[in-house]
Image (spheres, rainbow, N blue to C red):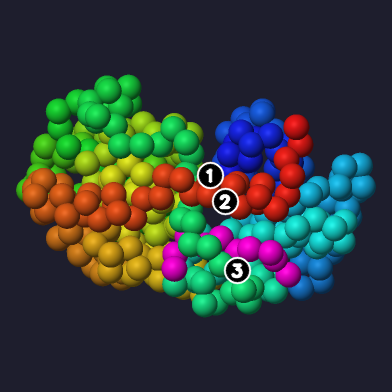
Amino acid sequence: MAGALRERGAESLLIVSEKEVDQLALGGESRFEVLRLPAVGLGGENRLRFLRRLWSSYRLCAAAFRGKAPDAVIGMGGFTSVAPALAGRRSGAALYLHDSNAIPGRANRWLSRWVKTAFVGFPEAATRLRCRDVVVSGTPVRGHLSRPASPSPARVELGLDPLRPVLLVMGGSQGARGVNQALLSALPRLAAEAPEIQYLHLTGASDLAGVEARYRELGLRAVTRPFLHEMELALGAATVAVSRAGASSIAEFAATRVPAILIPLPSAADDHQTANARAVAAAGGAVFLPQSEAQAGGLADQVLPLIRDSQRRQPIITALERLHRPDSAQQIADRICRHVPPVL
């Protein structure tokens, strides 16, 4: 998103929380100035602590904006966006937001009354926001993500056989125990019925050792990592993916045309991952599988026919082509720059 604005002559300040997941997402980004704020999340956290962190974040943003007032602020979701939006509103900036989920988050629902335009990843989200101007823009993905001509180079670079199918297993930036457990339960059957499958498993740090041990025990070819910055390799190598139903992951599957079995996080706020998975599955772009069914043996039932039969994958790939919005970041940047003059 910041890159698309930069191409149009705009300067950008990235504002993120101090949480590990945000630092991983930055991935050593050096093109833009970055402001880090105390992590702000409502959840079950002490309300007084929440308000203190929000106030601290607001003061940091207000101080930064006094040095150079922004023309526009766009919040990308989460309570980390609240302080920059409020500080920006006070400094006279035009406010925008983007929500990638089918059910917008609480912070965006609250902020939507003040924004000029809200951009959403799913049409279903539009009716849940309080602003008049809502644009279904899709969710921006990293510009270098696209469907590769062949999966072989990515597989070789990851240490996998270039000719054997790859099951990519991922649970988001920090892994997902529920997805890991479902896959480990399915492994004996997968090994017996489809020994040709090789695995690329992004486990998260806490489950890495146990998952590695299980692959060794079954004699399966697997690359296991706690986290992978080079997601273009993972997605480029994959035949099929097993994943949580985060909106960014779904957008990346669409960009790279990877058929996915989506196992939503049951505890996600407002059950938004289930809404995401249902919306994509209804459009034909994924398989929706509740975690309870996945852990009860249903995962192997979904993986086996999909990874072994290209004819079953093709309708999903076709649907992903329809769902992918390659101009998402450009569309958002164009709309903002149309109302806010860029710095030339």
Amino acid type of disc 1?
Gln
Residue 112 vertical position relative to residue 89 in the rendered view, above or below: below
The local secondary structure at tag 3 comes to loop
Asked whether the residues under the numbered discs 2 and 1 touch, taking CB atoms below 8 Å apart as contact, a structural biologist would say yes
Residue 133 numbered tag: 3
Q: Quadrant of residue 162?
A: top left
Residue 250 vertical position relative to residue 51 in the rendered view, above or below: above
* Mark 2: few/some/many CA within 10 Å (<14, 14-19, 20+): many
Give the x, y percent position of residue 151. Answer: 24, 30
Q: Which residue is mark 1?
A: 330
State the CA–CA distance, disc 3 to disc 1.
18 Å
Give the x, y percent position of residue 165. Answer: 17, 37
Amino acid type of disc 2?
Ile
State the CA–CA distance, disc 2 to disc 1.
5 Å
Q: Give the residue at x 28% y 64%.
A: 283
Q: Quadrant of residue 107?
A: bottom right
* Mark 1: few/some/many CA within 10 Å (<14, 14-19, 20+): some
Asked whether the residues under the numbered discs 2 and 3 touch, taking CB atoms below 8 Å apart as contact, a structural biologist would say no
Q: What's the magenta region?
A: 114-123
Q: Give the residue at x 30% y 27%.
A: 154
